[in-house]
Image: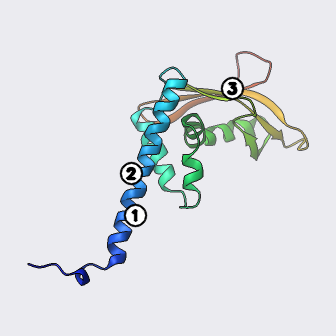
Amino acid sequence: MTIRPTDFPVSMVTGRLSRAITMMLCVGAVLSGISADAWAQGNAHPSPAEQQIIMRRLDALSARERPGVMGQDMAWQMTTFLCQDAARAMLVRRGALPHRFFLQDDRLGSQVVVSPALIEGRGQYQPAAAPMRWVPFTWACHLDPATGHVVHFDVNPEGRQGGGS
């Protein structure tokens, strides 16, 4: 059996090739982020379940958004893709506007992957009662590495230690 070039439209072949290359680049970026962050943060990296969630969230991004997000370090990706929704719920309960918060600040080390079960950081939110100011806080995102889901998210006003919820 002879296969002629007309048997497979070029667009079908290039589309499949493009998707395969994109997927390999995504996996490579995540894995390279893991190794760089693991070295910088004491060998901490996401569990396999957490890696799957991150990959699903990356795959859901548009082709325009994906390169910028993949350029972020693993601490940022884990914070954004694993912890952000739990943080929003907790911060709204504390009086924050639902889409006016950051789980980072302008200083180095504002997000640290301590282990696959714990990410810690600093952030700020705008309170609904006084939206012209930002309230700094520290946070801890406790994860179940087996599922990649948040078990508990702690918020502490900056300067206060322990006992946050």
Discs 2, 3 touching: Cβ within 8 Å: no
Mark before the other along the chain sequence, 1 or 3: 1
Cα distance, mark 2 to mark 3?
Answer: 39 Å
Q: Residues within 10 Å of mark 1 (few under 14, many from 20)?
A: few
**Residue sitting at the far top:** 161
Q: Are marks 2 and 1 in contact (CB under 8 Å)?
A: no
Lateral position of residue 107 relative to residue 53, left or right = right
Q: Residue at x 71, y 22 (%)?
A: 164
Q: Residue at x 54, y 36 (%)?
A: 74
The residue identified by callout 1 is 18
Query: Would residue 116 be visible to someone looking at this image?
Result: no
From mark 1 to mark 3, how far is it between C-alphas?
Answer: 45 Å
Which quarter of the image is occupied by the C terminus? Answer: top right
Q: Earlier in the sequence, mark 2 or mark 1?
A: 1
Question: Hey, what amino acid is under mark 2?
Answer: Met
**On residue 24, which mark appears?**
2
Vertical relation: 54 (above or below) 41:
below
Disc 1 marks a residue whose amino acid type is Ser
Residue 130 in percent (x, y) is at: 91, 41
Above or below, comparing residue 44 to residue 99 in the picture: above
User: Can residue 110 be seen from the camera position used here?
Assistant: yes
The residue lying toward the viewer, choosing from 102 and 106, is: 106
Residue 156 horizontal side relative to residue 140, left or right: right
The residue that disc 3 covers is 165
